[in-house]
Image (cartoon, coloured by chain):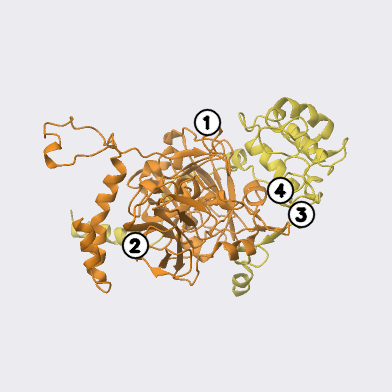
Amino acid sequence: MTSRTQIELLPRSANVSRRGFVGGLSAGVLSAVATEAAGAETLAEIPDRGPGADLSAHSERSRFAKIDRIPESTPGKRNIDPGDAINSKTPHQKLVGNITPTDLHYERSHSGVPDIDPAQHRLLIHGMVSKPLVLSVDDLKRMPSISRIVFIECTGNGWENWKKADPDITVQNTHGLVSTNEWTGVPLKFLIDLVAKDRASSWMLAEGGDGAGVDRSIPLTDEIVNEAFVAYGQNGEPLRPAHGFPMRLVMPGFEGNLNIKWLRRLKFGNAPWMTRWETARYTQLLADGKARQFQLRMETNSVITQPSGMMQIQPGYNRISGLAWSGHGKIAKVDISTDGAKTWKQAQLSQPVLSKAQVRFQMDWEWDGKPTKIVSRSADDQGNVQPDRQSFIAAMGTNALFHYNAQQTWSIDEAGRVRNVLA
Amino acid sequence: MSSHKLVLTGVLAIALLAAPALAFDFGRPATPQEIKLWDIDVGPDGKGLPDGSGTAMQGKQIFADNCAACHGDNGQGGIKDRLAGGQGTLASNMPVKTVGSFWPYATTLFDYVRRAMPYPTPGSLSTDETYAVTAYILSLNGIVAADGKVDKDSLPKIKMPNRDGFIPEPEFDPTKLFRKSERRR
């Protein structure tokens, strides 16, 4: 095939042209995902052109592009009734680029998705403030706003692999609880000034208007005060109900659970409240029976999404692609090993590389048809490196349930079948 | 428009841009009465606990009527979270995290029942009923006597079995986090 030869001819040093070329290939891969039925062999077989469907009020996905989230429960509980689901996972194996489509952003809730009329929604800000306020959605929209592309990640992302690796699962099952969107809203700092927060207040309680009234204590570090915001926009439109309509907290780089959805109360205090979610739930049990608490930041992480679990590849040219992210800052580097973590090569990062956002990485690979294992390893600009499975488990044990960021290994057998393995 | 008015408008515009927005430019002041309606959080020191009380005996019936369908008759064996037992399992390969084996504060139990339970109708239990259910769940774990009672004074004084089972992440350790900046002030 011509394109294959072209890739081999490209000099390894020609980084700029290679990057441009590889970027141009992504459309081909996308269509390969979308059209599974046998395609046209010659141009003569391509259907004739003709008038298309009427224009419409909004665009639907092509009937040939079948892409859905999967509602799931705790580790190992898959293929369940949506009524028993506690989360719904992003299909990373079918997506390209850095941004997650709005309707495919992962979803997690503790009491379902409330149906909130924005006209009847209020945000109460009170506690250690001089001027407690009640704000409407319209009030928020009138304020100075920011937009920022960030990842949000459930602390349960990766939890399928703590104790064992089910070979027959996809990257959607293993890593579908992280997504990246552009969020628009009002900086927390602006709201803090508005209510004249007492300087002695160092913690803030954020509470949702869902049935569970999910609430978390948030330390008011400089980083959080400067970066957190109350969002009402998601990828240019109002938040979707599953993601907090009409308003939610966005905490770039921090546990998904802190990004309180359906936000209805911010209370300023000077110590954490020790809510159920920050004591009984999102704490990490170590091997000695003690639990790590207030592990609020999401770690340096990456995963290969193509090829990944349950795919099958052919010998010869393959492009490896995946996503990397870090709650500490910007991804600085992603390395890929195609020999089971013995040797590593640096992958290319798709621009732009943003702080606390997912970034796409890719690398060309010639598979020789022999069984092997592929794995990615990310590093961020704060010097953090994604740990290998062995040292990660040595530090965390296998009972932590949350904050799994060990390197993800996919095995490939002689038939090219890609499967989930621990390492 | 006169030049005088133009200058005034300009000054106003600059003032609006430069100064932080005045407090009630957005929204409206929250009244103490309405804050009270939503101010439901309870801290580990008992701050926020309301007047009232409940006994484990009273709680047994309330639990049977409102909680047992999901959590099992004695807080075990239900389709949702197990609430009792599990003490001594946290370092094993199959840890059982319950109120008795894992939760560090009894105040959190009252807060959580009041805000989130019963699942289909959160907030439907009265204050006394919430205290009673709290007492009953604690009694299932041997933390409150079978004929024990809890209220806003006793609840914060209960030392849960796993109270010392948590290690704060150094970056966000509440006992150390804001010490430096407080000294600077």
Tags 1 and 4 both on a single chain: no
User: What colour has chain B?
Assistant: yellow
SS assignment at label 2:
strand
The residue to which callout 1 is attached is: A81
Q: CA distance from mark 4 to mark 2?
A: 41 Å
SS assignment at label 1:
loop
Chain in orange, by letter, is: A
Horizontal side of A99 relative to A419 (left or right) equals left
At 74% from the left and 31% from the top, the residue drawn is B129
Given residues A336 and A227, the one toward you in this image is A336
Task: Residue A83 in the image: state x and y as whole percent.
Answer: 53, 31
Callout 4, which amino acid? Met
Horizontal side of B174 relative to B146 (left or right) equals left
The residue to which callout 2 is attached is: A365
Q: Which mark is residue B163?
A: 3
At 46% from the left and 39% from the top, the residue drawn is A70
Q: CA distance from mark 4 to mark 3?
A: 20 Å
Callout 2, which amino acid? Trp
Task: Residue A240 in the image: state x and y as whole percent.
Answer: 40, 40
Mark 2 belongs to chain: A
SS assignment at label 3:
loop
